[in-house]
């Protein structure tokens, strides 16, 4: 008996119409169709002491004024679930900047950033430039606005190491200092939050000198859209997700901690168990989760339940 046309039809994996998702050939999902084994991406997470040392109330007041009080109060980020982030990247489409799920499309929005981390999403764009590479300029700027001088290696690379900034937090402040001392310390906190958690690069431990220009004026700092799509948290996350989805990098920068929080909020069946959840008025959602999330176990050893 001759086979029907339908039985002879070849199974074509992927999209019937490539006119919209035109980057499929470069996309990491091609490895899935081809049966190629892939490794989890590596995500950067701040491992410093920012939440381990007490913060002076006058420093916290300045951090609040600069717009970083919400994310600071969210506490130490949870461990990154690399399987989850990898699975999300496999479903990320750079053409539409959305995740493609069986139930439809979804993505991290400005509202998510504001609700989860308490960051400002409207205001001035976070854009700047490197004014000079003159070492003496950066020595004086760092001394004036942060209260310490970068070491030789940092001056050569024009970056602060996380450890250098974190070590400043170990210096205890009394109640007798002039106000500018507390402002200097607040800038250190903001630099660590920005360069290590909100828009970390792939290195994960270097914070460029030119970030300091955004914190020199406290009032001006509060006017920036730190969580928005104009050069800050959301824009950086989108860019890094696109790069990873096109297999251009395995070390993923950007706010992967935020992405994981978003996934827990939006995909309820993978959310870790919460003990005695209590709503906190006018507080970032991540602050609640940081305090009451149990140690999560979303996957078995060497098993990737999200990937296929």
Image (spheres, helix red, strand yellow):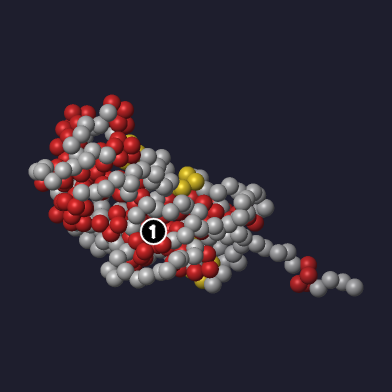
Residue identifier under label 1: 290
User: Can I make out residue 7 in this image?
Assistant: yes
Mark 1 Cα shell of 10 Å, populated few (<14), some (14-19), many (≥20): some
Viewer-side residue, 15 vs 219: 219
User: Can I make out residue 138 in this image?
Assistant: no
Q: Quadrant of residue 118?
A: bottom left
Residue at x-position 41% and y-position 69%: 277
Q: What is the x, y in percent for residue 300? A: 61, 55
Q: What is the x, y in percent for residue 22? A: 52, 59
Residue at x-position 53% and y-position 68%: 269
Q: What is the x, y in percent for residue 5? A: 78, 72
Residue at x-position 45% and y-position 66%: 275
Quadrant of image for the C terminus: bottom right
Q: Quadrant of residue 242?
A: bottom left
Most extreme residue toward the top is 152
Residue at x-position 14% and y-position 37%: 144
Number of disc labels: 1
Quadrant of image for the N terminus: bottom right
Q: Is residue 116 above or below residue 178?
A: below
Image-based side of 160 in relation to 62, left or right: right
Q: What is the x, y in percent for residue 166? A: 30, 40
Q: Secondary structure at mark 1?
A: helix
């Amino acid at each position: 008996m001759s086979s029907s046309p339908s039985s002879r039809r070849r199974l074509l994996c992927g999209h019937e119409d490539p006119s919209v998702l035109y980057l499929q050939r470069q996309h990491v999902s091609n490895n899935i169709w081809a049966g190629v084994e892939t490794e989890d991406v590596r995500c950067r997470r701040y491992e410093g002491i920012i939440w381990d040392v007490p913060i002076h109330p006058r420093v916290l007041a300045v951090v609040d004024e600069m717009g970083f009080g919400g994310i600071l109060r969210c506490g130490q980020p949870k461990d990154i679930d690399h399987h989850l982030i990898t699975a999300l990247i496999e479903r990320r489409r750079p053409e539409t900047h959305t995740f493609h799920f069986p139930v439809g499309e979804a993505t991290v929005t400005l509202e998510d950033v504001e609700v989860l981390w308490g960051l400002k999403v409207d205001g001035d764009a976070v854009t700047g430039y490197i004014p000079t590479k003159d070492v003496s300029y950066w020595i004086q700027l760092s001394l004036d606005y942060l209260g310490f001088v970068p070491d030789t290696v940092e001056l050569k690379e024009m970056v602060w190491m996380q450890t250098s900034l974190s070590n400043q937090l170990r210096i205890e402040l009394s109640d007798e200092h002039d106000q500018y001392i507390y402002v200097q310390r607040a800038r250190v906190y903001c630099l660590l939050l920005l360069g290590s958690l909100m828009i970390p690069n792939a290195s994960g431990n270097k914070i460029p000198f030119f970030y300091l220009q955004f914190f020199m004026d406290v009032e001006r700092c509060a006017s920036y859209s730190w969580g928005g799509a104009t050069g800050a948290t959301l824009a950086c996350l989108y860019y890094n997700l696109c790069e990873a989805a096109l297999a251009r990098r395995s070390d993923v920068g950007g706010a992967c901690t935020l992405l994981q929080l978003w996934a827990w909020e939006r995909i309820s069946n993978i959310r870790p168990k919460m003990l005695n959840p209590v709503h906190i008025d006018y507080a970032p959602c991540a602050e609640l989760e940081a305090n009451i999330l149990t140690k999560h176990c979303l996957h078995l050893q060497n098993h990737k339940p999200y990937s296929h």
